[in-house]
Image (tube, rainbow, N blue to C red):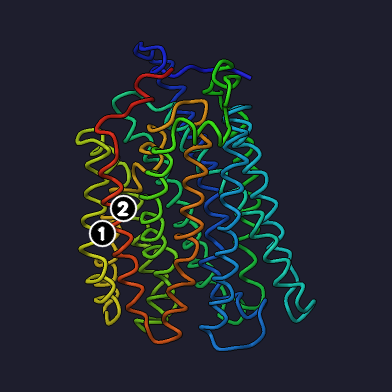
Amino acid sequence: MTDTASPATTGTAPSPEEVRKRIFAIVAASSGNLVEWFDFYVYAFSAIYFASSFFPKADPTAQLLNTAGVFAAGFLMRPIGGWLFGRLADRAGRKHSMVISVTMMCFGSLMIACLPTYAAIGNWAPALLLVARLLQGLSVGGEYGTTATYMSEVALKGRRGFFSSFQYVTLIGGQLLAVLVVVVLEQLLTEAELKAWGWRIPFVVGAVTAVVALLLRRTLHETTTAQSRNREGAGTVGEIFRHHKAAFFTVLGYTAGGSLIFYTFTTYMQKYLVNTAGMPIKTASYVMTGCLFLYMCMQPLFGALSDRIGRRNNMLLFGALGALATVPILTALKTVSSPEMALVLICVALAIVSFYTSISGIVKAEMFPPEVRALGVGLAYAIANAAFGGSAEYVALGLKSIGHETVFYWYVTAMMVVAFLVSLRLPRQARYLHHEH
């Protein structure tokens, strides 16, 4: 294993060769991140086609509730993944953790691609689908914290917000590719073919690309040192709660709101446009494709902005604007008739979310020292994401099914207020990445 100290650690400016290595490391780590999230999100975007294959015949909302429940179950594994892979990354190195997580994601995707339907094996079908999603949830739970930590450690000083934003460029890119694959299949296959077997194709694509990501990640250099990996308390929850409890709960607080609003305007939004606004499935897919592309392009801009105005100000703007705009935007989208207007409204919401997502990894990593950084980031993120992000679709669809859909708008707004209040606790300047122990 090669130990590569950060320039922040040494206090010296990196050489041109070092800059090239670090940019390649960002690209390699990002590509694996893209594949991980493609595999995870393709479930959400193809669920509308395979819901009837795994659950008994019922009305469309009930079938979507079932698939959303399995989607949420994948999130429940994230805290375990955040702890397991965070500990591994802090004690054995970031590279090992990232290689294992992408391998696990590959297996989960391949499993879904090959699953028999409910008609073939009865209740075993949804049960095995759940097992595959639990594996993927475990993988993604470990992916976020380790990748966020790794990218923050290889990013160049003074441009950490910009470079770290590429974590969400590729995370959103994974979503975008998932939508694009579904859109392409919608052009090539009939709806009946998609529901019969076409929905399996994206999962095969995900499994194959995960192998490519695995090969790329094997070329990465390690960013931790033997000293930090062997430090007493490295990679332990006890160390976090002894010395970094405030940081942990701060990250937990603003991640709850950030995850909820992110999933509201990305994965759930396609179903919202179809079920609530009455938009045709294909039109909704086109709208979300455009939205996700523009959202992806926003990330480096908002990341660079944080390098100028500070992470804390980015987060305060996110909480305040999110609290003010969520109800008006969701209310307007409820009765939207023009796909173009829907795109504009969703992009306005995603621009607000970008204040958070562009610096999501770096703002968390900057609050922990290297020996517990991956665990602190990954576990706090995974717990909040499981509780609030993973349940977003289920809560929204559940409230809609009992005639109280607007309650969900206010729920998101309340969590934005929480994100704003918690962000007030953020340090005005990064503490650890600029002055490593």
Residue at image point 39% right, 87% down: 403
Q: What element carries label 2?
A: helix
The picture quadrant where one finds residue 364 is top left
Mark 2 — residue?
Answer: 419
Residue at image point 29% right, 58% down: 416
Mark 1 — residue?
Answer: 322
Amino acid type shown at disc 1: Gly
Q: In which quarter of the image is the N terminus?
A: top right
Q: Where is residue 232 in the image (x, y as percent from the top left)?
A: 58, 21
The picture quadrant where one finds residue 270 is bottom left
Residue at image point 62% right, 44% down: 102
Looking at the image, is 146 positioned above or below residue 40? above
Amino acid type shown at disc 2: Ala
Q: Which of 276 and 224 is in front in this view?
A: 224
Using residue 135 as the reference point, say whether residue 13 is left or right of it.
Answer: left
Q: Nearer the viewer, residue 166 or 94?
A: 94
Q: Position of residue 312 (x, y in %)?
A: 25, 40
